[in-house]
Image (spheres, coloured by chain):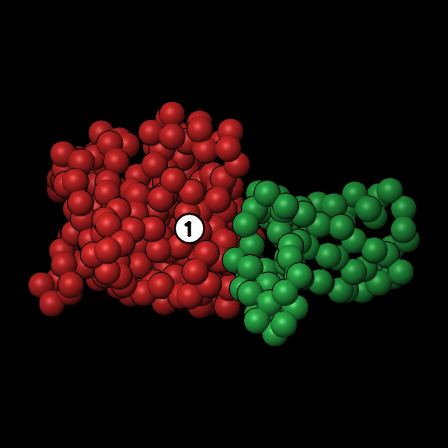
Amino acid sequence: MRVAIIQFPGSNCDWDAWHAINDVIGLPAERVWHKSALPVETEAVIVPGGFSFGDYLRCGAIARFSPIMEDLKTFSEKGGPVFGICNGFQILCEAGLLPGALIRNNCIEFRCVNQCLAPEDSTENFNRADLGEKIYLPIAHGEGNYRLDADDLSALEANGQVLLRYAGDPVDGPGHGNPNGSVNDIAGVRNAAGNVFGMMPHPERVVEPFHPGLDGIDVLRAFLSPLLEEEPVEMVSA
Amino acid sequence: MKVTVFVSPKPTVLDPQGAAVEHAMKSLGHASAQGVRVGKTITFEIDGEDDPDTRKKLDVLCDGLLSNPIIEDFRYEID
């Protein structure tokens, strides 16, 4: 096992993430229950989408206090890659591992559509050259409206911490333009150190020929690049 | 003792739920309705007295779990 996918009560994208990483990217992944310790061999963590603890109180507010979150905090402080998708993004924001907060979509509706997005040049591996100027990833959320106060937002932008923005012209129909009222059209961010990612769109849902697209593969590979660049250690028998 | 916590969206944060309720109020004929904000009330029983130590613990509870300081304000009453 190299990639841990944390499963909370109410997580529902854990198997999709497992399939994308295990079968499509080809890195051995395992689902890890939120009351377990993070396995010592973990090299990257996915906090998957869903409705952890029924989204009660606020999205991610209760999951943030799950036992595994202490291990996750330690893992991320040591530079371990952590990627929160949709509800996972909300959990990482609540836990303070990512800046900002996600509130109700300004349209009030739950938005479920294949969304046009513009990647930013954010890190060595997450950039337009590798991902393209425009990509499409599904969104499915009611609380994806990203909020951050003006000073912190300026710092976020100045540091290049925005990963993705909602893009496209709304006249082109659903999936184009800002679907939820997020400030600066922000769909995904990273922490200052560059090892913790979070986004509302679902890359794990566009990785197979029968999916609406394949753009999720490059997004997941960009996050997992530290694991993909290294040659696996060969076990040499005596 | 009984504690009642009131959580409300920060004045600077837009409140889509409040805006939707305001729209409904106007369509029901309350044309002057404005500034609608929707928050939540959380009530619970807890051991202790109303003293600075208890209030300190309640502040931590409200700031960490019951509200998110980035988007919400809280206040509480102790009976």
Residue farthest to the bottom, as pictured? B28
Q: Along the line of sight, which residue is nearer the eye, A147 or A236?
A: A147
Give above or below for B4 relative to B74.
below
The residue drawn where x is 65% and y is 68% is: B30
Subunit bearing disc 1: A
Q: Residue at x 45, y 33 (%)?
A: A153
- Quarter placement of the C terminus of chain A: top left
Colour in which the image shows chain B = green
The structure residue drawn at horizontal position 51% and vertical position 29%, both measured from the top left corner, is: A151
A57 sits left or right of A36 in the view: right
- Of A58 and B22, the residue lying toward us: B22
Query: Is residue A185 among what the camera can see?
Result: yes
Is A138 placed left or right of A142 in the picture?
Answer: left
Q: Colour of chain A?
A: red
Asked which secondary structure carries label 1, the reply is: loop
Above-or-below relation of B17 to A83: below
* Mark 1 lies on residue: A181
Instruction: Report x, y in % for residue A80.
Output: 35, 38
- Front-most of residues A169 and A155: A169
Amino acid at pointer 1? Gly
On screen, residue A91 versus residue B26, left or right, reads: left
x, y percentage for residue B51? 90, 46
Residue A5 visible in the shown view? no
